[in-house]
């Protein structure tokens, strides 16, 4: 790998566009459904190992379009969240889930303390180190944007929201984007939906953005909207303009030119 794109740990995380010049850092924790061979199949059939319980389908492609549009670095997970969810602290029960949504994860049941600690060392620690190290290279705290996707139906209930703008105690970017939503999209947009801080999903924001005062937002995109390369590019293009405008409303200079996504 070059200095622009490199992998860290044992395939735990990857840095895209590491030389990006914008005052922005993109993060995609659930970018991959890859399970290294030594973990077998975790007792799951192929369809579940590629389903939403294993990663956020479409999220990495959207994040890559944003990275290109803004010329911003992107830190992405390189292994399935079923092994370790890098948007959770090690002590969280769902960091290594024994059950996800309605599905049992046999390969995660009954892990010893040593086995759990090994997962933390293998996946959590390299991801956090790469993210912290990339963030530390900025002269001033950048805008931190995390990119996720969610299912149209959860536990049998349809979800009306199409784009969620999530925040923790710093709501500057989320509220600025919400206030501008109608200018940029006709999709159904909501704050802290379909998840919020009470669900434990703002760990990356709490661990990396809040301590240094970095403006931040967590994007949740309904995954039926980003199921194809064309749709991913269209959503990426729309989000790029929306994020840039919201940052400007907050008096934040990203140094981004907002180039169209390919």
Image (cartoon, rainbow, N blue to C red):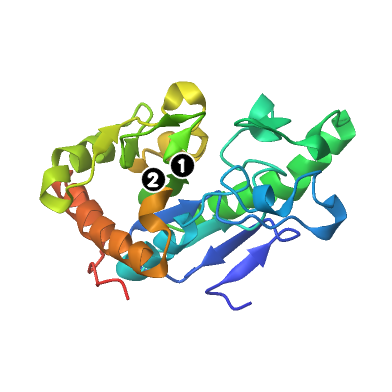
Residue 128 shown left or right of residue 174 in the figure: right
Q: Is residue 130 above or below residue 178?
A: below
Q: Nearest the camera: 64 or 127? A: 64
Name the residue rendered at 31%, 68% in the picture.
69
Image-quadrant location for residue 121: top right
In the displayed orientation, state which residue is furthest to the top: 198
Q: Is residue 247 above or below residue 179?
A: below
Q: Which residue is mark 2?
A: 222
Q: Is residue 31 above or below residue 256?
A: above
Image-quadrant location for residue 191: top left
State the image coordinates of residue 188 (x, y, percent, origin top left): 24, 40
Residue 69 shown left or right of residue 252 in the figure: right
Q: Between disc 2 and disc 1, whose residue precedes?
A: 1
Count of marks, rendered view: 2
In the displayed orientation, state which residue is furthest to the front: 156
Q: Secondary structure at mark 2?
A: strand
State the image coordinates of residue 13 (x, y, percent, origin top left): 63, 57
Do the numbered discs 2 and 1 sit on residues whose CB atoms are within 8 Å? yes
State the image coordinates of residue 202 (x, y, percent, origin top left): 47, 33
State the image coordinates of residue 122 (x, y, percent, origin top left): 76, 49
Residue 151, labelled with which disc? 1
Name the residue rendered at 59%, 34% in the picture.
88
């Amino acid at each position: 790998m070059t200095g622009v794109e490199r992998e860290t740990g044992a395939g735990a995380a990857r840095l895209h566009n590491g030389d990006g010049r914008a005052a922005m850092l993109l993060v995609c924790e659930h970018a991959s459904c890859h399970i290294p061979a030594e973990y077998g199949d975790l007792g799951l059939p192929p369809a579940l190992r590629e389903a939403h319980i294993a990663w956020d389908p479409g999220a990495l492609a959207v994040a890559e379009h944003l990275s290109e549009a803004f010329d911003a670095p992107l830190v992405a997970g390189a292994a399935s969240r079923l092994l370790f969810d890098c948007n959770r602290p090690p002590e969280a029960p769902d960091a290594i889930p024994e059950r996800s949504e309605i599905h049992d994860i046999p390969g995660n049941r009954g892990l010893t303390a040593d086995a759990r600690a090994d997962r933390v060392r293998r996946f959590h620690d390299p991801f956090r180190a790469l993210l912290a190290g990339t963030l530390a290279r900025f002269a001033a705290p950048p805008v931190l944007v995390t990119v996720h996707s969610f299912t149209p139906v959860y536990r049998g209930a349809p979800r009306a929201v199409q784009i969620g703008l999530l925040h923790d105690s710093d709501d500057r970017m989320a509220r600025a984007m919400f206030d501008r939503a109608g200018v940029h999209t006709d999709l159904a947009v909501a704050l802290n939906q379909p998840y919020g801080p009470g669900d434990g999903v703002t760990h990356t924001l709490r661990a990396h953005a809040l301590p240094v005062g970095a403006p931040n937002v967590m994007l949740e995109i309904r995954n039926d909207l980003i199921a194809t390369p064309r749709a991913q590019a269209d959503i990426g293009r729309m989000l790029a303009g929306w994020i840039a405008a919201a940052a400007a409303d907050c008096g934040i200079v990203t140094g981004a030119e907002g180039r169209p996504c390919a």
